[in-house]
């Protein structure tokens, strides 16, 4: 099993990796399919199913799909260009992707929210179709957005395709137990094994520049969030709070007025800054998803700004360790809220961040595994019930609390010797089973939980 750090941490656009980035990626893949086809196309259309339909408006799934069909992609997304292109598409009722003819596409008629027919492979299904001059469908593909911006066709999903292609890697661990065995046998840290795997698939230099870019984008997102206020889009009138809290924390610095627990506010405010940016449709890094994108950057920024002896040279090890844990969770359970609830999103993010922090604070592989286990264990059962389908409430605060739990989990693990009763593998399997048993209304459909119990929402 190999899942690259660059698949886990992808630069993209908010508010959702599964409902915004994934559909945009699926549309880009469909354009490639059209380009490789011998047919002459005159139009495109599509339908959104399951959770993509139920919370698609709040997550801007329609907008992302349309922009994807127009040739936009998450990693090079330009907000102003996207706005201009959407206005043109609405007026002209066509899309003009590169290397394809101008295609008929009326956003109001040609992209359907299908609330009645979920697709069988996954909660986040979509169908894209291309038509001939008469409007008849001559090319059709089903895509599933399986979380974290990952997209599979129905054939790939049925064949179990995920991460098995490419050259062999030196440390092919599929479970936390195997990871610890390989660490013990090799004498290497989890970060060093993960680095070895990445280098086997790429090169050391691109790993260095790639991880540096990931942290730059994460940190820039924190900074934008800390310096922007106003009301978030979507109709809930949620006020951005990160700037105000950060300004107050800065003003209190050095005044000897604050209680020790104020450090929690620093962790929260970094996470909230990211998730407010995400909710506003800004540029974020999946970690492992957009909805949970604030946890890991918050813990890393907390480490760099507040932990004595912290060094920027440790950022790469932090990210490698976190990616190793995220890969285990994705491979053995899920990182998708639509598949397993918020335990799979913020829970996974918290486990990844706890492992990263524990590693750069000198934790052994056993302590790192313990840190991830503690963080994930105490998110088990957490549902996904965003109000109005917007990635705002409870998501923004939840990332702050996920960061606090991650730091506590790393700290507790560092107080022990790595021996503990519940293995990380058992918690991951428990998360998988709990997600399977969870009622659909708690899996990113906004049909239950907070989404139906908050007055006037
Ligand atoms: S509740 Fe959790 S899983 Fe659901 S959208 Fe919000 S952050 Fe994502």
Image (spheres, grey):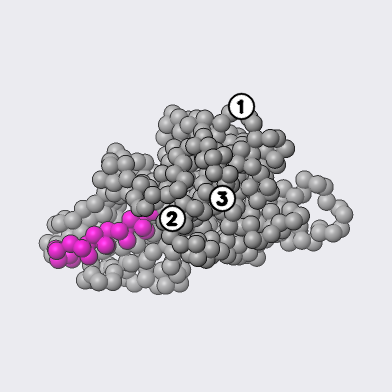
Q: Quadrant of residue 433?
A: top left
Question: Relative to the observer, which residue lies in front, 274 or 320?
Answer: 320
Q: Are marks 3 and 2 in contact (CB under 8 Å)?
A: no
Residue placed under numbered mark 1 in the picture: 421
Where residue 160 sits in the image (x, y, percent)? 32, 41
- Does the numbered disc 1 mark a residue whose Cβ is under 8 Å from ligand 1? no
For residue 278, side relative to residue 124 (left or right):
right
- SS at circle 3: helix
Sequence order check, earlier mark of 3 and 1: 3
The N terminus: image quadrant: top left
Q: Which residues are magenta?
A: 16-44
Question: Relative to the observer, which residue lies in front, 408 or 342?
Answer: 408
Residue extending furthest toward the top: 421
Q: Are marks 3 and 1 in contact (CB under 8 Å)?
A: no
Which numbered dot is residue 191?
3
Marks 3, 2: nearer the viewer:
2
**Looking at the image, can residue 403 be seen?**
no
Which numbered dot is residue 200?
2
Q: Is disc 1 surrounded by few (<14), some (14 to 19) or many (20+) residues within 10 Å? A: few
Sequence order check, earlier mark of 3 and 2: 3
For residue 74, side relative to residue 376 (left or right):
left
Magenta stretch, overall SS: helix
Q: Quadrant of residue 201?
A: bottom left
Where residue 2 sits in the image (x, y, percent)? 42, 48
Please check the rendered image and state whether residue 146 is part of the magenta-colored stretch, yes or no: no
């Amino acid at each position: 099993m190999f899942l690259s750090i660059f698949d886990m941490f992808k630069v993209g656009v908010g508010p959702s990796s599964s409902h915004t980035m994934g559909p945009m990626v699926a549309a880009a893949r469909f354009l490639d399919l059209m380009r490789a086809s011998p047919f002459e196309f005159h139009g495109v259309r599509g339908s959104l199913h399951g959770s993509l339909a139920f919370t698609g408006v709040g997550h801007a799934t329609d907008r992302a799909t349309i922009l994807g069909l127009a040739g936009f992609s998450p990693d090079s997304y330009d907000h102003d260009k996207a706005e201009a292109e959407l206005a043109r598409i609405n007026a002209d009722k066509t899309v003009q992707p590169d290397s394809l003819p101008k295609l008929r596409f009326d956003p109001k008629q040609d992209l359907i929210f299908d609330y009645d027919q979920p697709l069988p492979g996954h909660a986040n299904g979509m169908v894209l179709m291309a038509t001939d001059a008469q409007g008849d469908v001559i090319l059709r593909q089903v895509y599933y957005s399986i979380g974290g911006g990952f997209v599979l066709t129905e054939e790939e999903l049925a064949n179990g395709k995920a991460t098995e292609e490419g050259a062999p890697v030196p440390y092919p661990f599929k479970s936390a137990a195997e990871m610890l065995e390989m660490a013990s046998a090799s004498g290497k840290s989890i970060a060093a094994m993960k680095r070895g795997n990445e280098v086997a698939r790429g090169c050391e230099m691109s790993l260095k520049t790639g991880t540096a870019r990931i942290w730059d984008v994460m940190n820039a997102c924190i900074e934008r969030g800390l310096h922007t206020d106003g009301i978030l889009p979507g109709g809930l009138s949620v006020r951005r709070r990160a700037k105000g809290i950060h300004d107050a924390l800065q003003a209190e610095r050095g005044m000897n007025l604050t209680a020790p627990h104020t450090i929690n506010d620093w962790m929260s405010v970094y996470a909230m800054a990211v998730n407010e940016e995400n909710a506003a449709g800004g540029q974020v890094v999946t970690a492992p998803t957009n909805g949970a994108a604030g946890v890991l950057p918050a813990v890393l920024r907390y480490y760099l700004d507040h932990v004595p002896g912290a060094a920027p040279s440790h950022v790469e090890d932090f990210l490698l360790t976190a990616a190793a844990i995220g890969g285990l969770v994705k491979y053995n359970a899920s990182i998708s809220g639509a598949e397993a609830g918020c335990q799979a999103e913020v829970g996974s993010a918290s486990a990844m961040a706890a492992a990263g922090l524990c590693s750069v604070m000198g934790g052994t592989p056993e302590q790192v595994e313990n840190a991830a286990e503690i963080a994930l264990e105490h998110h088990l059962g957490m549902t996904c019930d965003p109000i109005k389908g917007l990635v705002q409430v409870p998501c923004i605060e939840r990332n702050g609390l996920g960061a606090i739990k991650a730091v506590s989990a790393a700290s507790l693990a560092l107080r022990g010797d790595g021996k503990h009763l519940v293995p990380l593998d058992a918690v991951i399997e428990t998360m998988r089973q709990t997600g399977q048993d969870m009622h659909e209304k708690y899996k990113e459909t906004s049909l239950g939980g907070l989404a139906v119990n908050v007055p006037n929402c």
